[in-house]
Amino acid sequence: MAIVVSSASTIEIDRPGQKPRALIDPFQRAITYLRVSVTDRCDFRCVYCMAEHMTFLPKADLLSLEELDRLCSAFIAKGVTKLRLTGGEPLVRRGIMTLVHSLSRHLASGALEELTLTTNGSQLQTYASELKACGIDRVNVSLDTLDPEKFRAITRWGDLNKVIAGIDAAQAAGLQVKINAVALKGMNEDEIADLLEWSHGRGMDLTVIEVMPLGDIDESRLDQYLPLSIVRSRLAESYTLEDIDYRTGGPARYVRVGETGGGWVSLRLSHTISVSHAIAFGSRALELFTCVLVRMMPLTCDVRCAPRKTTSS
């Protein structure tokens, strides 16, 4: 059985033999976009994301690849048409391509319109061609600076040349790439325009993400915090920014940049809450965090229980 949050915030149950009900949030929005964290591990330690010496979840607390497949398939049966794999870094999960290959059957059947992932790019050179062969058409790559020394400082362990090689491999394989850059006060705020020019010059769109000044990361996110309103006003000094109605189901808002040939730049709040905006309205996305919890306001539940207690979807 599966739970559904209705407009009255009550729980309804799908009965055996019935067509699964669509997922509807309390604001009467159909949930069609699912982001799934397949691992909490990463081969970087970005200063705005993780402490340098992390304690990760025990293996027993993570859903297996088979359990993730069952869970994702259940969501697809309930109307999810876009599925994004995230982490941590999804491509460091052992056997991850087994899951990607398996989920691609939903693309072949037409039940899933898009399967994609967000990556730091470190493993793309290895997996780009295989991802494309599985039906993935586009990926998001996190890249906050084009300066090798700054890149090392931000990621602590990362190699910029390896990420650029991964982006090269992705584009050579026919994958559409979008760059995600976190705006960091005093670190890369003077590079946003350079990232925009570089991304658009390579046929890639750019999303600028506002850091969320909360959480335990060894540093204060308040020191890193740069409001997107400031980022936009600075870009507007050099570029013509035209608001457009394009939406992807998430909280990002898109503008077209006239001077770079019409490429897009989007401004996105980190997660769904920020200091400068109370809530990122209009999101039709659901997030499955660290393979353990699924959250759809006002409901939070442990998703390990169902796939481990029953063979039914």
Image (tube, rainbow, N blue to C red):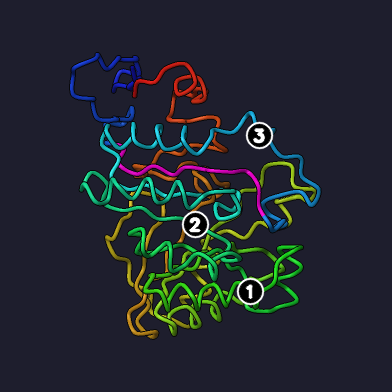
Q: Which residues are magenta?
A: 31-42
Q: Position of residue 8 (x, y in %)?
A: 30, 18
Cα separation between marks 3 and 2: 22 Å
In this view, the mark in front (3 or 2):
3
> Considering only vertical position in the picture, is 36 above or below 17?
below
Cα separation between marks 3 and 1: 28 Å
- 117 and 218: which one is in front? 117
120 with respect to 310 (left or right): right
Q: Position of residue 72 (x, y in %)?
A: 39, 37
Cα separation between marks 2 and 1: 16 Å
User: For the residue labelled by badge 2, is the local secondary structure a helix, a strand or a loop?
Assistant: strand
User: For the residue labelled by badge 1, is the local secondary structure a helix, a strand or a loop?
Assistant: helix
Task: Identify the mark nearer the N-term, 2 or 1.
Answer: 2
Q: Residue at x 38, y 46 (%)?
A: 102
Q: Position of residue 25 (x, y in %)?
A: 33, 30
Q: Which mark is residue 118?
A: 2
Task: Identify the mark nearer the N-term, 3 or 2.
Answer: 3
Q: Which mark is residue 59?
A: 3
Q: Which residue type does callout 1 highlight?
A: Lys
| Residue at the disc numbered 1 | 162
Circle 2/circle 1 CB separation < 8 Å: no
In this view, the mark in front (3 or 1):
3
Q: Are there few (<14), some (14-19), or many (20+) residues within 10 Å of tag 2?
A: many
- 85 and 249: which one is in front? 85
185 with respect to 12 (left or right): right
Task: Identify the mark nearer the N-term, 3 or 1.
Answer: 3
Q: Residue at x 62, y 43 (%)?
A: 40
Q: Residue at x 27, y 51 (%)?
A: 107
